[in-house]
Image (cartoon, rainbow, N blue to C red):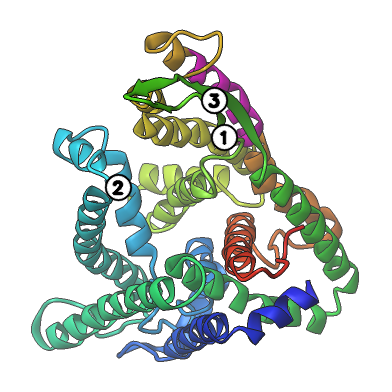
Amino acid sequence: MIDAVRNSFRLPDLRNKLLVTLGLLVIYRLAAHIPAPGVDQNVLKQVFASNPLVGLLDMFSGGALSRFSVMSMGVYPYITSSIILQLLVPIIPQLEELSKEGEQGVQKINQYTNWLTIPLALLQGWGQSVLLARAGVLPHFGFTGANLLPTVTTLISLTAGTAFAMWLGELITSDGIGNGISIIIFGGIVAAMPRRMGQMLAAGNYVGFTVLILVMIITVAVIVFVQEGERRIPVQYAKRVRGRKVYGGQSTYVPLRVNAAGMIPIIFAQSLMILPATLASYFVGSSTPWIASVASATTSVFNIQGWFYWFAYFWMVVGFTYFYTDVVFRQQNLPETLQRQGGFIPGIRAGKITETYLNKVMSRITLVGALFLAAVAVIPFFVRGFTSTSVMLISSAGLLIVVGVVLDTMKQMEAQLLMRHYEGFIR
């Protein structure tokens, strides 16, 4: 490992890619400390001490939201836009046709994704601002009178921060190492870890700190094992004779990943589980008795400290894993691709029977991936008895992102080294 890192810095072009990636990541983190205009920092600290939803968003922004900086939203409007386009591809015929046009079609869909990101960033910025304005963080937020200009300035600043983060991510992808958007998210998540560690050590919770470190190490090992797990479906390509040449006839396989959904189901489930209690908190003090009663009951049921929250969270992750995996798998359209390329699964007829067989196999291995994701998601519920806190140093979704980005970046560096006849990271 150490030799591989040393070899990476010996190669001028690879060293430049690493330095570009590191430099752009530093620029992103510096920009995350530039506050948006009109923020009352004292009130902001009080809000983050009592609201779990903004605490979740702050973790993904690497602490940018707790300062309400111009990078508060990071690249998450872009992620939302990507998910929306991905879900719309099988629904809208025009997008489905574009997805089948190869690299040109993919670039067109990426362009639509970038366009959709801007209105989503404005919408998300408005939502965050309204949430914080109600808590008194933005005292001059509103679209009337003297508040109009400060409000527009705040929304433009937040949207510009997202656009700047996207631009940095594209620069990392083209001139650096790894997927730029993923690297940006990775930097935000990891940046919050030293602060959390310092808070636990300052509180004297050494036993809890040790337990969390051990749980993280074990969890990372399991994540690596499952993330790299796949079911290989053998594929045989028929021989084709053209003139005096024979084409095809080789054997290969189709890798079906155990966890094809990544961390998306955890993000979906966590957002939905936090939403009811967050909305209900605004009606607890209502003057109408039955509204206040329903809001109080909802807050109690969806309390993050209660067992019902984690029980529902577990099964919601399982459900979202099956749903998202099915959507992504159908978009790949493997049976049609194999038939078009002259490939077939030994013992399985091409066409509908192949589709049924692949769906059956995917459903079985997705069960393992779904239970794995759900188990990772509820780890804080089980460790809080030892650590006196349900907050991990890095959240479940954060761990999945960090491990995935590290593995992907290592594989890219591995390929770069092997092209130059060096031994890589993975042996």
Q: Earlier in the sequence, mark 1 or mark 3?
A: 1
Q: Secondary structure at mark 3?
A: helix
The kind of residue on which mark 2 rests is Ile
Secondary structure character of the magenta stretch overall? helix
Quarter of the image for residue 157 reads bottom left
The residue depicted at 63 percent of the width and 42 percent of the height is 373
Mark 3–mark 2 distance (CA, rounded to whole Å): 23 Å
The residue depicted at 57 percent of the width and 20 percent of the height is 361
Residue 365, given in percent of the width and then of the height, sits at 62, 27
Q: How many marks?
A: 3
The kind of residue on which mark 1 rests is Pro
In this view, the residue farthest toward the right is: 207
Residue 366, magenta (yes or no): yes
State the extent of the magenta-drawn residues as a range. 357-370
Relative to 18, 166 lies left or right: left
Using the rendered image of the protein, determine whether residue 306 is visible from the camera's viewpoint: no
Q: Earlier in the sequence, mark 2 or mark 1?
A: 2
Q: Secondary structure at mark 1?
A: strand
Relative to 253, 279 lies left or right: left
Quarter of the image for residue 232 reads top right
**Closer to us: mark 2 or mark 1?**
1
Rendered position, 78 above or below 66: above
The residue depicted at 38 percent of the width and 10 percent of the height is 352
Residue 101, given in percent of the width and then of the height, sits at 22, 42
Q: Which residue is mark 3?
A: 362
Residue 343, given in percent of the width and then of the height, sits at 44, 22
Which label number is shown at residue 255?
Answer: 1
Mark 1–mark 3 distance (CA, rounded to whole Å): 11 Å
Which label number is shown at residue 84?
Answer: 2
The residue depicted at 74 percent of the width and 77 percent of the height is 197
Q: Earlier in the sequence, mark 3 or mark 2?
A: 2
Relative to 317, 105 lies left or right: left
